[in-house]
Amino acid sequence: MKTRMTEMFGLDVPIFAFSHCRDVVVEATRAGGMGVLGTTRVTPEQLEMELKWIDDHTDGRPYALDLALPQKMGEVHMLHERETTLPPEHVAFVDRILRDAGIPELPAHEREQLAEYASGYRLTAQGGMELIEVALRHPQIKLVVSALGIAPKEMIDLLHAKGLKVGALIGSAKHAKNQVDAGIDVLIAQGMEAGAHSGSITSMVLWPQIVDAAAPVPVLAAGGIGRGRQMAAALALGCEGVWCGSIWLGTRESELSPDMKERFFAAGSEDAIQRRVFTGKQCRMLRSAFTDAWDAPGAPTPLPMPQQGLLVTEARARIERARRKEYMGYYVGQIVGDMKEETSTKGVIYDMLTEYSDAVEKLQQQMEAE
């Protein structure tokens, strides 16, 4: 395939695979697409180890990095400060959910490990620059994407000076001009069907709006993509490739536990709901007994980012450890309704390309029919 994205990065196919799992990033990159490593909750030292491993397994092929840099945040605290810095009523509410469900506390050593992991929450401009400094030591990284708004000017200028492209996820056409004016090279138009942080406009409406608003800057389509027919629709609407995230969660390379995958495979698209429960910002996630508790009358309003994440991080770990499947949840888009069994990253890409070719051929036949 040949699009502006394959030419810009030297790819075989214009499929961008976002994942927090390095194995998915490697497999997608080796299959001819571009793996994109998500960096939420990672320290510079951890990122260095991840990137070194990816470098060693991708045969010199290009890959990308995704940073979450929100424009507005509350004060950042560490996990061990949860009880002393967050509103007592919120802490009590979460503790009551777990107590009523009979979900035990974490062993002391696991709680310490979780606190160390959560301390790597780099959702600040300074934290982002520290990660950028690590990324610049790895020349296979050709693209850095800002997932939450416009990246700081000094970051964009530094990346451009080093020869990297800069991308941004947006959920409305009105944000396109600001991103283009900031010097963004690639826009990812993310429809509301997407997992995690997402907007309120559907992909079918959003993609062509952003293509028109951003021209001549190339656009990748995101939100509800996991099949070749969806890829064909995205390219027909003017996009230069696709950005997929949720679909990789059902692969054998995914970081998810078998229990969580089982929940996904049993879910329908309507079970991927938008709530502020996990991060404080609107996210699409799998509905669960935990999210239902936040929807119930009398539940408190979720805290802003990152306090809400601090509030529920340990609760989510306790639920996972206890294997209470009905309370388990994770970020996932509406494509979850198409995820029925475990697959592989390479297999997903192969199936997408096969279905894409069949769809394009069918359209061509319809055009040529007398």
Image: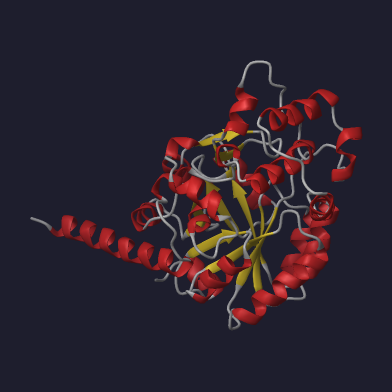
Look at the picture and state if 68 lies above or below 360. above
Q: Where is residue 341 in the image (x, y as percent from the top left)?
A: 41, 55
Question: Which quarter of the figure is the N terminus placed in?
Answer: bottom left
Q: Where is residue 55 in the image (x, y as percent from the top left)?
A: 66, 78
The answer to whether residue 29 is left or right of residue 352 is right
In the rendered image, the vertical position of residue 72 relative to residue 185, given as above or below:
above
Is 176 drawn above or below residue 19 in the view shown? above
Quadrant including the C terminus: bottom left
Q: Residue at x 52, y 69 (%)?
A: 28
Check the image and name the residue furthest to the left: 370
Question: Residue 223: in sight, yes or no?
Answer: no
Which image quadrant is residue 346 in? bottom left
Image point 48% across, 49% down: which residue? Answer: 262
Q: Examine the image and state in which quarter residue 2 appears.
A: bottom left
Q: How many marks?
A: 0
Foreground residue, 20 or 291?
291
